[in-house]
Amino acid sequence: MHYDLAYTLAPHAPTTAATEHLRFQLKDNASPLLLDFRDGQVVSLSINEHSTPVTESNGHILLPPSMLLVGLNNIEVHFSANIAAAEKAITRFDDHDDGSEYIYTLFVPMDASMAFPCFDQPDLKGRFHLEITAPEAWTVVSNTNPVSSDKLPEAQTRTSFGETEPISTYLFAYAAGPFHKVHPVDGLPGLYVRKSKAKAAESEALAVQQIAADGMRHLSTYFAQPFPFPKYDMVLIPGFAFGGMEHAGATFLREESVLFRTAPTQTNIVNRDIIILHELTHQWFGDSTTMKWFDDLWLKEGFAQYMAYQTLATMHPNDNVWKRFYESIKPAAYGIDETQGTTPIYQDIPNLKDAKSAYGAIVYSKAPGIIKQLAFVLGEDNFRKGLQLYLHQHQYSNAQWSDLTYAFEAVSGQSLKQWADMWIRHRGMPQIEVAWSCAKDRIDSFHVTQHDVLGQGYLWPVSSEAMLGYADGTSTTVAIRLNSANADVAAAVGQPCPAYVFANARDQGYGLFCWTIPAALTSCRISRRCGTSSTDPCSGVRSGHRCASPSSLLSTICN
C-alpha cells in the first residue's frame, strides 16, 4: 500500500488543502470498500482514473465494488483537513513569546483518518511519500529526510520527503514551523525546538542527543538489528498531549519534559532519559514490528518501558536504575491490581474508537513489571535471543503476543502457555507469604504460599528470589518457583537461620510479597495503625507477616 500525500499549509488557516494518491492491492472486489475519513471535506474522488460522486457514511468514504479491480487499484482524492489548537489530528500552537506559529500531527490511536483518507488500523501498513508546501521561513520535519526543496512564488517552499518503510497510519507524522535545529552534530540524532527556545535548549541539547545516540547503539546490539529507519529526529512540542510519541524516524517529545525551567535534580534527568529511551525503543518494538490490533497495546508499551530501564541500567550501571524502576513502576501497578476495578493486561478492544481506553497503569506499569519477571523466568540470554528472533521474523510487519511467546519458547525450550495465560489474560495478582523455621541455627523448613488478592481463586506461576537477611547486614538469596497454592523451597533448607526473609529480592517477581520475621520479633510494636494499601509497609500485619516494599524493609522491622 502506498500513500502519496501533498499538503499546503498557510499561516493561521483553519484548514489545509491536500491531495492524496493511494495505491493498494485488492484480493476481492465483491463488496464495497470503506476508506476511513472523518472531520474533513472531500472535494473530488477518482477511482482507477474514473471520477465518481463521493458517498460518505459514518466516518467512511464508500468505494463501490463496480469501480474496484482485483489487483492494483489507484485512488485520487482532493480534500481539506481541519487545523485547530485542540481536538484535531493536525494541531496549531501559537508561541506567545514571539508570535510564531507551529503545526504538528498526532494520530495515535485512531486519528489519522481525521487528516487524510486511509485504512486506519495498525495491521494495514503502507509506505508514505509526503510533500509539504509551507512558508519558506518554516522548517518541516517528517518520518524521512527531505529529498528536494523548491522555492515557489509568494515566499513559499515545497519540500518533498523520501518514501518511508512500511508503517502503520498512526506512525506517520509531520511538524512544520520556524523550528530551530539545535546543536547539529554528525552521528547524533537531530533535535528541533521552536525558535524562541533555541538558546535555552543549547545547554540541554547535547545530553539529550547523546543519550539517544548511546541508546541507539545499545538497542541495535541488543536486538541484533540496526536502527530500522533512515534517520532519527526528536522534535520538542510545547504542551504535547503525551510525554512522547514514537513516530517512525521522528519522535515528538513534550518540550516541558526535556527542557528544564530550573536546575534539574538527578531524578529529573533520569525521568527525561527514560522518556527518550522509551520512545527510541519503539522504533524497533512498535514501529518496525507493530501490534496487529490495540488489544496488544501493552505489547509495545510494556516492552518499551522495560527496555528503557534495561538500556539505562546498562549504560549507567552505578545509578540504581532498577531501584528507580521499582519506585516508579510498581506502586501504580500494585495500587490498581489490588482493586476490583483492575483489568487483565490483554484487553478486548472491539472497535478502534475504544483503543484510547486501553491506556493506563496496567499497560504502562504492570506490563513492564510482568516483563521483568519474564526475563527472570527465561534467563537474560534466552530473553534477549527471543526478542531478536521475534523482531527478525516480523520486521516492518505486524505481530501479536502469541508470536512473541513462540519466539521465547523456540529459543528457551520452555513452555509459556500457563505463564502467559495467567499473567496476560487474567486480572489481579497473588499475595506471596513465607513460613520458615530453624533448628540448631539452620533452616529446617521453608514454605511458600500464594493466594489471590481479589479472592477469585486464581493461582499464578510465580518466580522470584527470596532474600535471607542476617543481623550482621549480610544476605543471600534462593530461587522461588511456585506453580500451585504452596511449595517447599529445598534450596533454603540448611542455610544459616536468618533474621528476616523477603520473598522478592531484586524485585524479580510481581505480586504482593510479604517479608517475614521470626516469632521472637513479633512482639515489636508498630507506632501507627496499619493501612490497607499494598504499598503501605505496615499493611497486612498478621501472624508475623508484614507486606512491604524491599526499600522499606529494614526500617519497618521494629518501628
Image (cartoon, grey):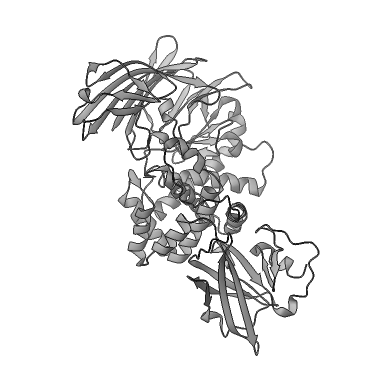
Quarter assignment of residue 410: bottom left
Q: Residue furthest left?
A: 70
531 on left or right of 367: right
**110 left or right of 20 in image:** right
| Residue 74, placed above or below residue 396 | above
Q: Residue furthest top?
A: 154
Please state the horizontal and vertical placement of residue 345, each as a whole percent of the image: 48, 52
Task: Report the label total.
Answer: 0
Identify which residue is drawn at 66% across, 62% down.
551
The quarter holding residue 443 reads bottom right
Quadrant of the image containing the N terminus:
top left
Q: Residue 187, relative to residue 79: is it above or below?
A: below
* Res. 321 visible in picture: yes
Up-down relation of residue 557 to residue 205 (above or below): below
- Image location of residue 125, percent across then percent down: 33, 37
Q: Quadrant of residue 492?
A: bottom right
Q: Foreground: 250 or 244?
A: 244
> Which residue extends farthest front?
456
* Residue 400 screen position, x and y as percent: 37, 49
Picture quarter with the C terminus: bottom right
Place of residue 180 in the rendered image (x, y in percent of width and height, measured from the top left): 52, 27
Residue at coordinates 68% horizontally, 66% vertically from top-left? 553
Question: Residue at horizontal 65%, vertical 90%?
Answer: 440
For the question of whether residue 311 can be seen, the reply is no
Q: Residue at x 55, y 25 (%)?
A: 86
